[in-house]
Amino acid sequence: MLLDLARSRKILFFGGKGGVGKTTVSAATAIARANEGARVLLVSTDPAHNLGHLFDRPIGAQPVCITAGLDALELDPKSTVEEHLREVSSALHQLMPANQYSEIDKHMSLSRDAPGMQEAALLERIADVIETGVEEYDLVIFDTAPSGHTARLMVLPQMMSAWTEGLIQRREKADRFAEIVRDLRSDSSMEDKTIGGADQQERQRESRIRQILLRRRNKFVHLREKIADPELTSFVIVLAAERLPVLETIELHEQLQQGGISVDGLIVNKRSPPDSGEFLDGRRAQEEVHLQTLHQALPDVTRQDLHLLAHDIVGLTAVEQLAAML
């Protein structure tokens, strides 16, 4: 099931409760497709990055080659916020008078820790990665943060595009009002001859502001279109066969469905293998109880089980061995 999704989609998101093995499963899927000859980009959006630990090597904000056909990168929310604020600050410095620079810088500093800033900045970075990734790679895989963070992130494009659209509409209303004021000035015999130049400058400034807002809106609209396209994008939920992960999976599925995100797979990781002694057999029986709850809630979502292994999965060789089991 998992490889079928990876072969038929351009974008795969892996999500679920913390600690269930999202990073390991997403990395194994990426290697499995790369071993089939596909060009794959594996992206971590989790602030607590584990890709570097998994592959036992440094991975940063720029793509690095893991093995033939597979590149990986880690999106760091803090550095993403700093880059986002630098870009916004630079744009505002170009648009506003020099005597406003100190106020702009003060506002940017206060915005650094504002609620939602990391999510908004991370979302723009994801949009950029997807925009270039679907052109340069056969498959882009996202290893996401735990459920709550991911659910918010996946519905954020719709919210951000609506919010930006509201700014554009308010900007247009302000522009129409300014146009009326300029018309009144032009009818006045007392018009200052320097006003015309100032009006032209103001029009140019307003035009640049509108262009920035339109670019931002279009970026979120295009991102929303891509992640909501079931032919292009799928979401896979990874879980353990335990009560809390099962309940959290059902809740995450509902949140994603409400956001128009297609959930096409459930990966039950670290299943107790059958016929492995009294202890694990008892454990497996308990797992079946929880998985029955999962099936009753999500009967139409395809499920794949991966058995618990006797050793930790660390390094490229170990991940490739798991990839061969998919």
Image (cartoon, rainbow, N blue to C red):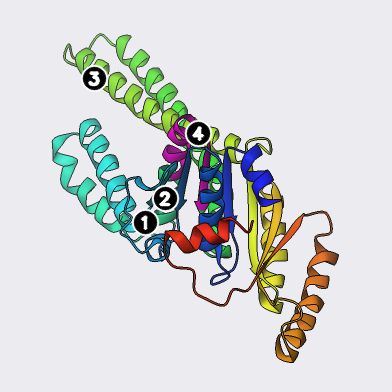
Q: Is residue 128 magenta?
A: yes
Instruction: Kindly check if marks 3 and 1 are in contact, taking CB atoms under 8 A apart as contact.
Output: no
- Residue 134: numbered disc: 4
Viewer-closest of 50 and 257: 50
Q: Is residue 219 visible?
A: yes
Name the amino acid, label 2. Answer: Leu
Residue for point 46% across, 31% down: 168
Residues at discs 1 and 2 in contact (Cβ within 8 Å): yes
Residue type pointed to by label 3: Gln
Dot 4, how many residues are within 10 Å of its Cα: few (below 14), some (14-19), or many (20+)? Answer: some
Picture quadrant of residue 8: top right
Circle 2 is placed at which residue position?
Answer: 122
Q: Which residue is mark 1?
A: 77
Disc 1 to disc 4, C-alpha distance: 22 Å
Magenta span includes 262: no
Residue 228 visible in the picture? no
Of mark 3 and mark 1, the one earlier in the sequence is: 1
